[in-house]
Amino acid sequence: MKKIIFWTITGGSLILLGFLIYFASMNMISNKVMTEVAGSITEDDLEKLASDPNIEALLGSSIDDLKAADLQKTSLPIKTKEEAVKKISESFSIDEIQQSVSKVKGGLTAEEQNELYSLLTERLSEEELTALKIIAVQEAKQSQ
């Protein structure tokens, strides 16, 4: 009877530890993706985002409006960096996230940008993408 209790507790602890490691690694990788994306945003990218009709309708057309946006006051489904990380973790596998990070680090060709964008549009709604764009811009602003 003691062996059964011991193995049950040991097995349960290992399963719990596995889940904790999985979620911690997903969080770390997702944060790395967000940092990499935020670091690669240029002023030209900011201007394109500010002129995006979805973003313009929510926040206005100036880059300063975009940087100072309070997503809590919008109807977007993702309002914080933590929610963005969670959504990325839920929508993409660890391998997909790692591959995306390595592509972004090495610089993206036009074809790779299109592949990445099509993957994002397959798995995320237009509102989620808009929120992720705004969060990436705000992260870029903080890292400057």
Image: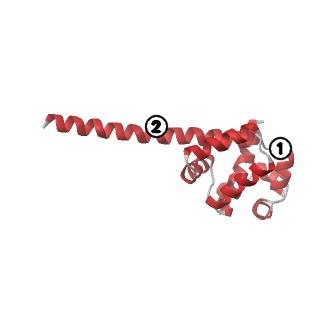
Which circle's residue, 1 or 2, is located before the other in the chain? 2
Q: Given contact means CB atoms under 8 Å apart, are the residues at marks 1 and 2 in contact?
A: no
Residue 106: which quarter of the image? Answer: top right
> Could you tell me which quadrant the C terminus lies in?
top right
* Number of other residues with Cα within 10 Å of mark 1, as a class: few under 14, some 14 to 19, many 20 or more: few
Of all residues, the one furthest to the front in this rendering is: 111
- Residue at x 80% of width, y 53% of height: 65
Say the numbered circle drawn on residue 21: 2
Say the numbered circle drawn on residue 29: none
Residue 59: which quarter of the image? Answer: bottom right
**Residue 37 at what x, y percent from top left?**
72, 43
The residue lying toward the viewer, choosing from 49 and 98, is: 98
Distance between the alpha carbons at the discs numbered 1 and 2: 34 Å
> Could you tell me which quadrant the N terminus lies in?
top left
The residue lying toward the viewer, choosing from 78 and 95, is: 95
The residue lying toward the viewer, choosing from 121 and 137, is: 121
Q: How is the image coloured?
A: secondary structure
105 versus 48 height, above or below? above
Amino acid at pointer 2: Ile
Amino acid at pointer 1: Thr
Residue 54: which quarter of the image? Answer: bottom right
**Residue 98 at what x, y percent from top left?**
61, 41
**Residue 120 at what x, y percent from top left?**
66, 56
- Residue at x 67% of width, y 62% of height: 127
Helix, strand or loop status at disc 2: helix
The residue lying toward the viewer, choosing from 92 and 5, is: 92
**Residue 110 at what x, y percent from top left?**
80, 50
Of all residues, the one furthest to the left in this rendering is: 1
Say the numbered circle drawn on residue 42: 1
